[in-house]
Amino acid sequence: MPGIICVPQPLAVEEVAKVLASGGNAFDAVVTYAVVQFLVNLNSCGIGGCMVMTSRLGRTSQFQLILDAPALAGSRVAPDIETVS
């Protein structure tokens, strides 16, 4: 499989490599990465975070916005939510 997988968690690298080796495409790989990253490091990638997803069409090299999901904090979120006691 020619290419590079550059993500922060070794487990995510392994899972993305499995997806690509079994015939998955870039979209399959990024979804796999997001799920694994969420499971192993919640502070880095989680449900409710900001997401912008684009694609580049190989034939035309034009970029297209696929999804724009801005992050919104819930009503019970406090400014010190990340503070470790």
Image (cartoon, grey):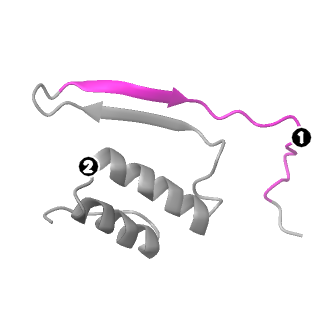
Relative to 27, is 1 above or below? below
Where are the magenta residues, as a range?
62-82
| Residue positioned 27% across, 53% down in the render | 24
> In the image as oriented, which residue stretches furthest toward the left?
59
Residue 22 spot, x, y in % from top left:
24, 62
**Which residue type carries mark 2?**
Asn
Left or right of 55 on screen, residue 79: right
Q: Where the N terminus falls, by quadrant?
A: bottom left
Residue 13 sits in quarter: bottom left
Left or right of 6 on screen, residue 84: right
Left or right of 43 on screen, residue 16: left
Residue 20 spot, x, y in % from top left:
26, 60
Query: Residue 68 versus residue 39: which sits nearer the camera?
Result: 39
Q: Which residue is mark 1?
A: 76
**Which residue type carries mark 1?**
Arg
SS assignment at label 1? loop
Per the model, the C-alpha gap separating discs 2 and 1 is 38 Å
Residue 34 spot, x, y in % from top left:
49, 54
Q: Nearer the viewer, mark 2 or mark 1?
A: 2
Left or right of 9 on screen, residue 14: left
SS assignment at label 2? loop
**Earlier residue among tags 2 and 1:** 2
Principal secondary structure, stretch drawn in magenta: loop
Using a 10 Å C-alpha cutoff, classify the residue at mark 2 as few (fewer than 14 neighbours), some (14 to 19) or many (20 or more).
Answer: few
Q: Which residue is mark 2?
A: 25
Q: Where the C terminus falls, by quadrant?
A: bottom right
Using a 10 Å C-alpha cutoff, classify the residue at mark 1 as few (fewer than 14 neighbours), some (14 to 19) or many (20 or more).
Answer: few
Indicate whether residue 34 is drawn in magenta.
no
| Residue positioned 15% across, 29% down in the render | 61
Indicate whether residue 75 is drawn in magenta.
yes
| Residue positioned 43% across, 50% down in the render | 31
